[in-house]
Image (tube, helix red, strand yellow):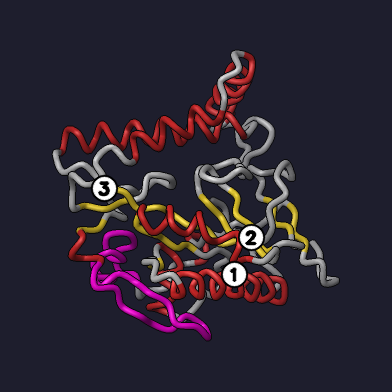
Amino acid sequence: MAYLQYDPLVLEQIQKIELEILAEFVRICNKYSLDYFLNYGTLLGAIRHKGFIPWDDDVDVCMPRKDYEQFLKISEKEFNGKFKLSGPDVKNHYYNLILNISKVGTRFCTSYDHGNYHIGIFIEIYPYDSLAENLKERKRQIRKTAFFQQLYLVYNVDFLKNSVSKTAKNFFPRLVSYIVHILLHLFHVHEDWIIRKHHEASTAYNGKSSILAQFVAGVVEEGSLQFNDLYPLREVPFENIMVKIPNQYDKLLRSLYGDYMQLPPEDQRQNHYPYLLEFHDGIDN
């Protein structure tokens, strides 16, 4: 993930829309008593900045699997046409295995997406499943989910052509991924099969372990939580709304970022600067 600096007004508008989506998500979860919690940079922003990290352009929210599945069932009717879901568990797929909620009438395309998907400015929702307690089984589970996660990306993205970084150093891996991309389509491997295999591996230990983790975006063990670290959920301010976070948020953030209260130097900052951005309000890039 690269870092490119936004025009401050553009970033402010992106964050404003993401906050609008997050507020709608929180409203639905509160209405139906669904558990969720902020994670990753969004959790860090809530603790360190009481809102967005100043240069951040995304929102990460996690849900236990049962709450995630319930959210999928009721969200569309609650959105009333203003927002939409895209991702592996709904009819509108995306290039990765992360569910997102986007605002209808906007557009946010990453370099990987490259305009092939009609996704608006969005927030991401990660389901949390059980991580195997046995070390050998855990490593196998992580390898298996990582394999299908990468396979899905390679299926949907031509990394030779559409990549954040195109250097001589990464040319060979990009070439290999392009060849695999072609072969997957040539042999008619369906993306739904990849989704199903990833889901089977992710949920294999549900009900058998008290360790929870997400399996769609790396940092599986670093972002894992014991059930007692997650609950009871806390409530904190994020910009102008109240949101839920893990009970032992400090333990989680230290696992992910170390001394997380220190601002990183600019060359270590990350964002998702878009290939294409549309607000449909007169501010387009």
Q: Residue at x 60, y 50 (%)?
A: 86
Residue 224 quadrant? bottom left
At numbered mark 1, what does the secondary structure look like: helix, strand or loop? helix
Q: Which of the two residues, 273 or 141, is positioned nearer the viewer here?
A: 141
Residue at (50% x, 48% y) in the render: 98
At which x and y percent is residue 3? 58, 58
Q: Earlier in the sequence, mark 3 or mark 1?
A: 1
Q: Residue at x 61, y 74 (%)?
A: 20
Tell me where the magenta segment starts and ends, as one range. 231-260
**Residue 41 or residue 102, whichever sits in front:** 102
Is the residue marked by circle 2 packed among few (<14), some (14-19), or many (20+) residues within 10 Å? many
Horizontal side, residue 113 vs residue 173: left or right: right
Question: Regarding mark 3 in the picture, which secondary structure is present there?
Answer: strand
Residue 21 — which label? 1
- Inspect the magenta stretch and tell me whether residue 259 lies in it: yes
* Amino acid type shown at disc 1: Ile
Farthest residue to the top: give it. 187
- Front residue of 80 and 63: 80
Q: Are marks 1 and 2 in contact (CB under 8 Å)?
A: yes
- Nearest the camera: 113 or 79? 79
Q: Is residue 156 above or below residue 241?
A: above
Residue 236 percent location from the top left of the image: 38, 82
Question: In terms of sequence position, does the residue under pointer 1 or pointer 2 come before the other?
Answer: 1
Q: Quadrant of residue 277?
A: bottom right
In the rendered structure, find residue 130 and report the number of the disc placed on it. 3
Mark-to-mark CA distance, 2 and 3: 27 Å
Measured from the top left, where is residue 38 in percent x and y? 41, 68
Q: Amino acid at mark 3?
A: Ser
Bin the neighbour count of mark 1 within 10 Å (Cα to Cα): few under 14, some 14-19, many 20 and up: many
Distance (Cα) linking label 1 and label 2:
7 Å
Could you say where residue 68 lies in the image, as x and y percent from the top left? 42, 56
Residue designated by label 2: 102
